[in-house]
Image (tube, grey):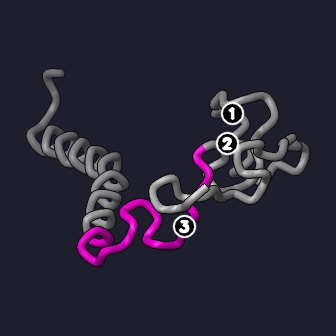
Amino acid sequence: MDNVTASEIAGFGVGTLLLCATIAAPKVDALISASQRSSLGMCRRCGDLRMIACSKCKGVGLLRKGGFGVNFVDDFFDSLGDANRTIQSVPCNNCQSKGRTQCPNCSTP
């Protein structure tokens, strides 16, 4: 660590700030959009659409077979478009494979 320059330390600091901003961006966006919806008299969660993305399948309607485990190797090969890999998926039981559910805040059961 004797050969670390001030520019390298500043680069690490800027990189850390960018990483923190990237992680916090979805939360900040959700907070701002919820407050805007509230000020317009709309449902804070769905914006009066009465439907939200399924929390289990994230709006896709399908789940990977084998549970919720994160396998970075499979994700890497999927991003490269490896034709030899097949992803087995099962329909989501939470949303009946539609990818959306009724908003719990404003929809009547």
Alpha carbon separation for disc pair 1 and 3? 37 Å
Whether residue 28 is in magenta: the answer is: no
Q: Are marks 2 and 3 in contact (CB under 8 Å)?
A: no
Are there few (<14), some (14-19), or many (20+) residues within 10 Å of tag 3?
Answer: some
Q: Name the residue furthest top.
A: 1
Task: Residue 99 in the image: state x and y as whole percent.
Answer: 69, 57
- Quarter holding the N terminus is top left
Q: Quadrant of the C terminus?
A: bottom right
Q: Nearer the viewer, residue 4 or 73?
A: 73
Residue located farthest toward the front when viewing the structure as drawn:
108
Q: Label 1, on which residue? A: 73
Q: Report the magenta stretch's main SS.
A: loop
Q: Nearer the viewer, residue 6 or 50?
A: 50
Looking at the rendered image, the disc whose residue lies closer to the viewer, 2 or 3, is 3
- CB-based contact (under 8 Å), mark 1 and mark 3: no
From the viewer's perspective, is 1 left or right of 58?
A: left
Q: Earlier in the sequence, mark 2 or mark 3?
A: 3
Disc 2 and disc 3: Cα gap in Å? 36 Å
Left or right of 33, for residue 96: right
Q: Is residue 98 left or right of residue 29?
A: right
Region rendered in magenta: 36-55
Depicted 3 relative to depicted 59: above or below:
above
CA gap, disc 1 and disc 2: 5 Å
Q: Residue at x 22, y 40 (%)?
A: 12
**Which residue sits at x=34%, y=46%?**
23
Residue 76: image tag: 2
Residue 96 lies, in percent from the top left, at 78, 51
For mark 2, give the secondary structure.
helix
Give the residue at x 71% y 44%: 94
Identify residue for label 3.
Answer: 50
Instruction: Give the amino acid at mark 2.
Output: Phe
